[in-house]
Image: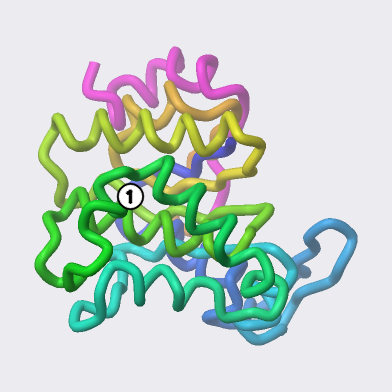
């Protein structure tokens, strides 16, 4: 797992949007597992195994939990493993099984974030992009969410996460990049970055 941290406006969300095909890069190449994905539309990026959980979750509030999860399995390969994926999501997030017939818009913030994660898993991804997963959540829910992300990571999924809660995210990932004004200022192992005085004072609050 890898984290991208930095101040607001550094380009973190833009980076994820470029990877997921939402916006085109101005320069450079996007290569994933040997395939050049630069300039490919978003649905082709998903077909290559990249799932994006955007900032703000972007659910379909009028649809039920089950219907939102089904939206994540829109590609043929994902449809073939739909039942297996659904069982796995309900195993990871039992509350979603309990609320499967409930409208997504009526869920709590934490439950909505679980649903957004579950929807991403329904696409059978190999790389999951998480954009500010803890945003707007109560502290106790943030801790629970990071525990769930650890479980997802332990199952072999590769995770790239953008997160303002630097203290927590550096405990979750192996490597981290500090982005400032679109450029990488620091990079390295997460625990080493967490010990840097600049990072501790500016981002961890120590």
* Residue 54 as seen in the image, left or right of residue 141: right
Residue 153 falls left or right of residue 40:
left
Residue found at x 78% / y 60%: 32
Q: Is residue 187 above or below residue 133?
A: above
- Does residue 12 appear left or right of residue 84 in this picture? left
* Residue numbers of the magenta segment: 183-206
Q: Which residue is mark 1?
A: 133
Percent coordinates x, y for residue 138 in the rendering:
11, 39
Task: Work out which quarter of the rendered image holds the C terminus and state it.
Answer: top left
Q: Residue at x 51, y 47 (%)?
A: 88
Quarter of the image that includes the N terminus: top right
Residue for point 41% across, 55% down: 117
The quarter of the displayed image where residue 157 is located = top right
Q: Residue at x 32, y 51 (%)?
A: 114
Q: Does residue 101 sit above or below 166 in this rendering?
A: below
Front one among 73 and 159: 73
């Amino acid at each position: 797992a890898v984290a991208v941290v930095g101040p607001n406006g550094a380009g973190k969300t833009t980076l994820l949007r470029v990877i997921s095909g939402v916006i085109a890069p101005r320069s450079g190449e996007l290569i994933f597992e040997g395939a050049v994905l630069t300039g490919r539309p978003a649905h082709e990026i998903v077909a290559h195994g990249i799932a994006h959980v955007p900032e703000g979750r972007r659910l379909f509030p009028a649809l039920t939990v089950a219907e939102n999860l089904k939206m994540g399995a829109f590609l043929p390969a994902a449809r073939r493993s739909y039942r297996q994926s659904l069982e796995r999501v309900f195993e990871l997030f039992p509350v979603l099984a309990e609320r499967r017939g409930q409208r997504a818009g009526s869920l709590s913030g934490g439950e909505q974030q679980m649903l957004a994660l579950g929807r991403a898993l329904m696409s059978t991804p190999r790389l999951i992009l998480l954009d500010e997963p803890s945003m707007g959540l109560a502290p106790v829910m943030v801790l629970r969410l990071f525990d769930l992300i650890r479980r997802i990571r332990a199952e072999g999924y590769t995770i790239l996460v953008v997160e303002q809660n630097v203290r927590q995210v550096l405990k979750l990932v192996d490597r981290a990049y500090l982005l400032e004004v679109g450029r990488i200022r620091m990079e390295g192992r997460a625990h080493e970055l967490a010990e840097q005085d600049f990072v501790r004072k500016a981002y961890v609050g120590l």
